[in-house]
Image: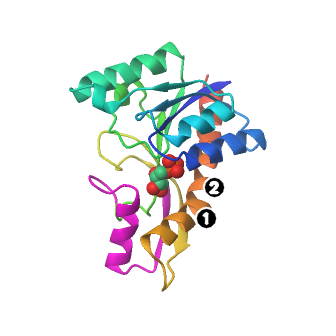
Amino acid sequence: MIKVAVLVSGGGTNLQAIIDAEKAGIITSGKISLVVASRSDAYALTRAENAGIPSAVLRRKDYADPKEYDAALLKVLKDNEIDLVVMAGFLSIVGEELIEAYRDRILNIHPSLLPSFGGQGFYGLKVHEAALERGVKVTGATVHFVNEIPDGGKILFQKAVEIREDDTPETLQRRVMEEAEWILLPAAVEKVSKDLANAR
Ligand code: GRF
């Protein structure tokens, strides 16, 4: 069974989608074995506890040097024999050491149709504010592999979401989560877990 770690920083609705997908038998090739939060107040930790999933808090602000944070995160993943890393609303940047150790085994969910509205500075509500500001008629979500370029790794899945005249950044974020993120991420976890299991 592929051991999956989910990295979180906030509400954890994407984590919840993966938890629910595992329970519903949509994810069968991987098992969420660990949740790592970059903040001790992330509600995602409560979701992990409710689901009986072990968690760890690695506060970004406890590490002056990003390289030290990266090394500490990598140690937690290795100590727990993690095979696949899923960034689900994780607001810290993972460094080269971790990316190299988990080459093509780190997934990220981004709330736009990359490469639009992606890269440095595009996260959370800012992504939807930019889409509305630009006046695009369609946005969506992307699951991609993580490499050294922010939001620049190989794209795995995308799903489009129509923008409505009366959308605010908040209503758009919610609909992109409901109609795209929470569908794409579980599907991606199952596909990559299956591929990793078959490659063993
Ligand atoms: C949301 O903005 C979502 O679009 C992005 O990360 C943020 C928090 O997601 N992927 P979550 O509720 O913590 O999963």
- At x 54% / y 22%, what residue is drawn? 82
Percent of width and height locating residue 53: 64, 28
> Does 152 appear above or below 174?
above
> Does 40 appear above or below 54?
below
Taking depth in this image into account, of 197 and 108 the one nearest to the observer is 108
User: Of the residues shown, which amino acid type is indicated by label 2?
Assistant: Ile
37 horizontally vs 50: left or right: left
Quarter holding the N terminus is top right
- At x 58% / y 49%, what residue is drawn? 13
Percent of width and height locating residue 75: 41, 16
Q: Which residues are magenta?
A: 118-143
User: Of the residues shown, which amino acid type is indicated by label 1?
Assistant: Glu
Q: Residues within 10 Å of mark 1 (few under 14, many from 20)?
A: some
Q: Which residue, given by chain and number where applicable, does mark 2 sit on?
A: 183
What is the secondary structure assignment of the residue under circle 1? helix
Q: Residues within 10 Å of mark 2 (few under 14, many from 20)?
A: some
Residue 131 located within the stretch drawn in magenta: yes
Taking depth in this image into account, of 38 and 100 the one nearest to the observer is 38
Quarter holding the C terminus is top right
Q: Which mark is residue 179?
A: 1
Can residue 139 be seen here?
yes
Q: Is mark 1 within 8 Å of ligand 1?
A: no
